[in-house]
Image: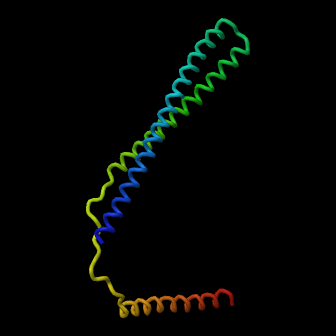
Amino acid sequence: MEALTTEILSNHQEKIKNKQELLESDIKRLQDNTDSLETEKEVLESRIKTLQKTVSTKQDTASQFALSDAKQELEIKKQDIGDLYIWMNLQSRLLEDMKATKVVKAAASDSTPVSPRPVLNAVIALVLGSFLGILAAFTRYWWGAVFK
């Protein structure tokens, strides 16, 4: 029995390690995505600044359209970055929760199993049968009174 318990514990610890590795790789990937989005955000911000200078000197519709398009792209990137930060936070919390999991004591089995109790089973069957019989009687009475 002890061998089985230790095998179960070792399998559980191995699964936890695998999940931790997966979560760590997810966090790394999310950080890389966040970094790339941050650089795209910086590029868009510089593009917006140059377009604003262009719009202030020239009042043509093409530069105004390009400026509004760049602002819209910037807002989308900001939203994506926020979503990635939320996802990274969730993944890191899951990783912390997994690290806090440990087995305090191995499970112990009882040497004398519990046997069935026929008298108790008969009493329970009698009580439930009585309830069902009374329910059936009331249902028949109601059915006859309503649909007569």
In this image, 6 relative to 86: left or right?
A: left
- Please give the name of the residue rendered at 60% of the width and 88% of the height, measured from the top-left corner: 142
The extreme front residue here reads 3
Please name the residue shown 55% across and 92% down the image: 137
In the rendered structure, the answer to whether residue 69 lies left or right of residue 131 reads right
Q: Residue at x 28, y 69 (%)?
A: 2
Please indicate whether residue 18 sits to the left or right of residue 36 in the image.
left
Residue 41, compared with residue 102, is above or below; it is above
Find residue 46 and report its horizontal and vertical position in percent: 56, 16
Question: Could you say where residue 33 lies in the image, as x and y percent from the top left?
Answer: 52, 33
Q: Relative to the observer, which residue lies in front, 58 or 97?
A: 97
Front residue of 91/134: it is 91
Q: Quadrant of the C terminus?
A: bottom right
Residue 108 in picture, x, y percent from top left: 27, 71
In this view, 77 is above or below 51: below
Left or right for 108, reference 70: left
Where residue 16 sits: x, y (%)? Answer: 39, 53
